[in-house]
Image (cartoon, helix red, strand yellow):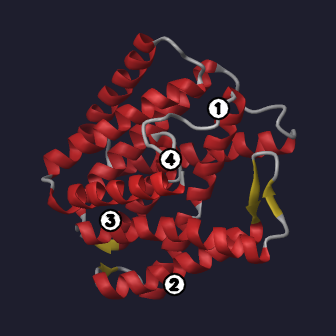
Amino acid sequence: MLKQRIITAVILAVLASLALFEASNQSWQWIVLGVGFIAAWEWAGFAQIEALWKKALYAGVTTLIGFYAVETLSDQNILMLTVLEALLLLSVVSRYQRTQGKVGTRSVGYVMLAGILSVVLFTTAFIHFRAEFSPQVVLMSLVVIWAIDTGAYFSGRKFGKTKLAVHVSPGKTWEGVWGGAALAFIISLIGLFLVQPELLFSEWIFALGLALVALFSVLGDLFESVLKRQAGLKDSGKILPGHGGVLDRIDSLLIAVPMLYLLWHFGAVA
């Protein structure tokens, strides 16, 4: 199982790096929209949609909306929708935790609309991000998000005592979250030094902003955990051997990527 997980992770890393650094902007757009289609297909499972044609219809409509959004949504629109998504995720997760898992968001329509909002914002922001900034900047930002997960895992194992949301994800602790944030801040400083972008703020302030924004990746992870628990699912899918589904790998990116893009867009010179 571990060997399979490592092999899949290496293959994904190579393919993602090739796409990020070698693909044209148009090719990148279709790649991201393709990932969005698979993510939306899996999201249909959270709404307990089982018919293949219904899943395909939902994923197709979501992808078409994403394609249209890339061409029409302004950065101000992306900002407003990202704030709306963050509030939605926070509301669902906090309510599920507060009621000890008794109340979440069981409405099929609500889950489907949340999926459209999350996937469309993710694909739109990711496409804009790659078009506006260098692949190095995008990669550095993704590494900051992964640093949150890595730092949270190790600091949580070593120091974790205070549960973050025991009814949503029993393994997560506040000590782990802050350990992840600390590592993300350090990685941000190193990354900014290496990439050397033209910033509107000092590197220290921008690195702190990157770390704080990346913290929202934890919220994305918790939100998917709520949806999987309500749907009785262990993983979002089976497309990635040893990892589950695409959503299991990008759940933390769904809210973090739009926020990181907005931070770069309004805080740096492309």
- The label shown at residue 233 is 1
Give the structural element (helix, strand or loop) at label 1. loop
Inspect this view and state whether residue 214 appears. yes
Residue flagged by tag 4: what amino acid is it? Gly
Q: Which residue is mark 4?
A: 242
Identify which residue, 5 or 114, lies in the foreground.
5
Q: Earlier in the sequence, mark 4 or mark 1?
A: 1
Number of the front mark, 4 or 3? 4
Number of the front mark, 4 or 2? 4
Label 4 – label 1 distance at C-alpha: 15 Å
Q: Which percent across, then down, holds residue 84? A: 55, 43
Q: Earlier in the sequence, mark 3 or mark 2?
A: 3
- The label shown at residue 147 is none
Give the structural element (helix, strand or loop) at label 4. loop
Label 1 – label 2 distance at C-alpha: 35 Å
Label 4 – label 3 distance at C-alpha: 26 Å
Neighbourhood count class around disc 1 (C-alpha, 10 Å): few under 14, some 14–19, many 20 upward: some
- The label shown at residue 138 is 3
Residue flagged by tag 2: what amino acid is it? Ile
Q: Which quadrant of the figure has residue 16?
A: bottom left
Q: Which residue is mark 2?
A: 186
Give the structural element (helix, strand or loop) at label 2. helix
Q: Are marks 1 and 3 in contact (CB under 8 Å)?
A: no
Q: In the displayed structure, does residue 15 sit left or right of residue 80?
A: left
Label 4 – label 2 distance at C-alpha: 30 Å
Q: Residue, x 45% and y 59% (percent of image)?
A: 6
Label 1 – label 3 distance at C-alpha: 31 Å
